[in-house]
Image (cartoon, helix red, strand yellow):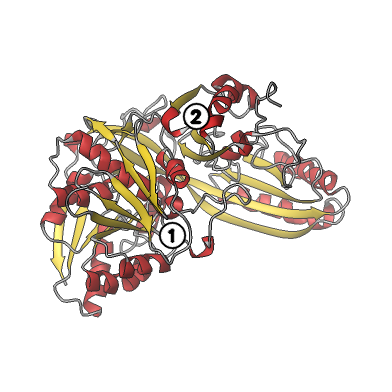
């Protein structure tokens, strides 16, 4: 490798990710930049609902705590923060962050707000759906929001402006990593092999600890040291786009070729064609090699022309989901649980024939029920009933029927719990990229 | 779950590790052998046809296999394999995160070496 490496870390890999390891990483990682990736498709839809209820909300509910914990460390170490915690309301998120920065006395801290991903006004009702027949108009549910995936080209102007904190909404996960890397090394927007290499770094890093031993342990086969204190990842990126994935020495977890490989194809279909707003990345010939303890070098990613369309996630109000359960243990637990399942199904069918109902027996057959697998000897099982409905009343009725099993169901049932939560549902459409105009607003504290 | 017995039939988990991901109603599971010497056995065991036949009620669409021989890995893309996906499925695991262990639980096709 020639030239100084660019050091970038992950401080969140999903909306509810842990905070303390992020603080450790900024304080001890000698980072140039840290990325907090906090959005999934449904997360944005839920955020739109929050915003509808209160126009000052609709951003990541942990934003305030994260900013209070991380801004001092970022300020001290000169680490740029890039995040999509703005969710459905980047402006409110940026304003809140500005207020926190002022409260902390961080005069001159530059906060950038990227908008333009909310494309509700730009997508026609007759827009065809992606990967399924029909158009948006065919979906018989209220739309809560529409967001286009913005790429590195929406983030780089904020870096040009010298921003210390960059907040957006639906910034594409790998693009938040690619942007500062491409910016540092001055990569050309048409240099697809390098953009592919930077996208690989982003892809490996975007789920945080999923590359440092999180979501990996399988005792006896894949043991992970000190998983409870697992550290977030660091990428040391070389000017050619190759990188070493590592972590702070004193943290738990591990970085091995195996942890890197599992993440390499996480949510990837054709490894030679991974589409992002920036590039069609090619991971099919990537080399993965251990170069030291918890150090793995990745190289040889490439890429070709970026897609001409951008993906838009459309969120819909999906009504309500009720979940309720009762447990059975000891001799014939499965038979008693199965009887309870049959009773609930019969009573619910009579009350609400059209409801979307599922009945599982946790311990014997739940996750793999449709796959046809069942544990025959379980003696500690839980009836678990799920119902989804437009109206809340159907969900309430289901909870009532499951709770009633305590007196008029099989013998020995106990431990009723039930809850009803609002649902969202998402669909995707593709729109020409020219239709989307990201905007940038930079404010100093 | 108990430790494997010497005489228990070998399963994919004995030679490989895996991770599952979802996009809509499509599941992908990447599978990697610990030992490069087992890659041939993995390829022989995990054919798209065999995976689809093992779980016909769950995996309802096409199964495509991508190969990364230099990393001893296979990537399976399974269409219509998530009971509708996170939007519609009432499975507790509506993302199909646990599908990696569906694949790892399949018996190895190693009759001649057993």
Residue A354 position, x and y percent, is 62, 36
Alpha-carbon span between mark 2 and mark 1: 28 Å
- Give percent across and percent down for residue A75: 23, 72
Residue B98 left/right relative to A262: right
Q: Residue sitting at 31 percent across and 61 percent down?
A: A55
| Residue A51 percent location from the top left of the image | 35, 57
Q: State the residue in front, A95 or B31.
A: B31
Assess whether mark 1 and mark 2 are in contact (beta carbons under 8 angstroms).
no
Q: Residues within 10 Å of mark 2 (few under 14, many from 20)?
A: many
Q: Chain of mark 1?
A: A
Other residues around mark 1 within 10 Å, as few (<14) / some (14–19) / many (≥20): some
- Mark 2 or 1, closer to the camera: 2
- Classify residue A399 as left or right of residue A336: left
Helix, strand or loop status at disc 2: strand
The residue singled out by tag 1 in the image is: A17
Question: Which residue appears at 25% of the width and 32% of the height?
Answer: A303
- Reading the image, the residue beneath label 2 is B76
Residue A108 to residue A59: above or below: below
- Observer able to see residue A173: no
Quarter of the image holding residue A62? bottom left
Q: Is residue A89 left or right of residue A407?
A: left
- Image quarter where the C terminus of chain A lies is bottom left
Q: Which chain is disc 2 placed on?
A: B
């Amino acid at each position: 490798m020639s030239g100084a490496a660019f050091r970038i870390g992950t401080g969140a890999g999903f909306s509810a990710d842990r905070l303390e390891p992020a603080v450790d990483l900024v304080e001890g990682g000698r980072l140039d930049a840290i990325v907090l990736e906090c959005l999934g498709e449904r997360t944005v839809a839920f955020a739109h609902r929050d915003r509808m209820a209160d126009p000052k909300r609709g951003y990541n509910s942990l934003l305030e705590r994260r900013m209070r914990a991380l801004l001092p460390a970022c300020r001290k170490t000169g680490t740029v923060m890039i995040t999509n915690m703005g969710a459905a309301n980047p402006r409110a998120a940026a304003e809140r962050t500005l207020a926190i920065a002022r409260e902390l006395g961080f005069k001159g801290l530059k906060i950038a707000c990227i908008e333009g991903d909310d494309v509700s006004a730009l997508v026609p009702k007759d827009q065809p759906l992606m990967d399924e027949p029909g158009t948006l108009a065919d979906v018989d549910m209220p739309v809560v929001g529409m967001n286009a995936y913005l790429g590195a080209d929406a983030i780089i102007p904020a870096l040009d402006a010298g921003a210390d904190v960059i907040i957006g909404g639906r910034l594409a996960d790998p693009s938040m990593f690619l942007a500062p890397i491409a910016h540092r090394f001055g990569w050309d927007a048409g240099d697809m092999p390098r953009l592919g290499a930077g996208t690989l770094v982003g892809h490996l890093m975007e789920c945080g600890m999923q590359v440092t031993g999180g979501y990996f342990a399988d005792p006896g086969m894949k043991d992970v040291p000190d998983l409870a204190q697992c550290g977030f990842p660091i990428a040391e990126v070389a000017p050619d786009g190759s990188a070493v994935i590592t972590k702070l020495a004193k943290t738990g977890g591990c970085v091995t070729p195996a942890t890197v490989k599992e993440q390499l194809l996480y949510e990837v279909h054709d490894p030679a064609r991974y589409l992002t707003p920036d590039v069609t990345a090619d991971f099919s010939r990537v080399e993965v090699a251990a170069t030291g303890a918890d150090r793995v070098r990745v190289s040889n990613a490439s890429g070709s022309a970026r897609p001409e369309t951008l993906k838009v996630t459309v969120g819909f109000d999906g009504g309500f989901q009720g979940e309720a359960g009762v447990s059975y243990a000891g001799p014939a637990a499965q038979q008693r649980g199965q009887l309870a399942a049959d009773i609930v199904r019969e009573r619910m069918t009579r009350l609400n024939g059209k409801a979307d109902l599922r009945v599982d027996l946790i311990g014997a057959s739940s996750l793999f029920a449709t796959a046809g697998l069942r544990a025959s000897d379980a003696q500690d099982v839980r009836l678990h009933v799920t119902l989804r409905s437009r109206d809340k009343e159907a969900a309430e009725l289901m909870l009532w029927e499951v709770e009633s099993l305590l007196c008029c169901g099989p013998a020995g049932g106990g431990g009723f719990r039930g809850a009803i939560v609002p649902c969202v549902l998402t669909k995707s459409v593709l729109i020409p990229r020219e239709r989307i105009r990201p905007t940038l607003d930079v404010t100093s504290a | 779950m108990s430790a494997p017995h010497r005489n228990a039939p070998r399963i994919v988990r004995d030679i490989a590790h895996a991770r599952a991901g979802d996009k809509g109603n499509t599941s992908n599971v990447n599978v990697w052998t610990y030992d490069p010497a087992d890659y041939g056995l993995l390829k022989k065991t995990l054919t798209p046809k065999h995976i689809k036949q093992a779980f016909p009620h769950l995996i309802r669409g096409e199964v495509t296999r991508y190969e990364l021989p230099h990393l001893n890995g296979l990537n399976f893309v399974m269409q219509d394999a998530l009971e509708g996906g996170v939007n519609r499925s009432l499975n507790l695991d509506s993302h199909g995160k646990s599908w990696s262990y569906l694949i790892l639980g399949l018996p190895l096709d190693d009759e001649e070496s057993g």
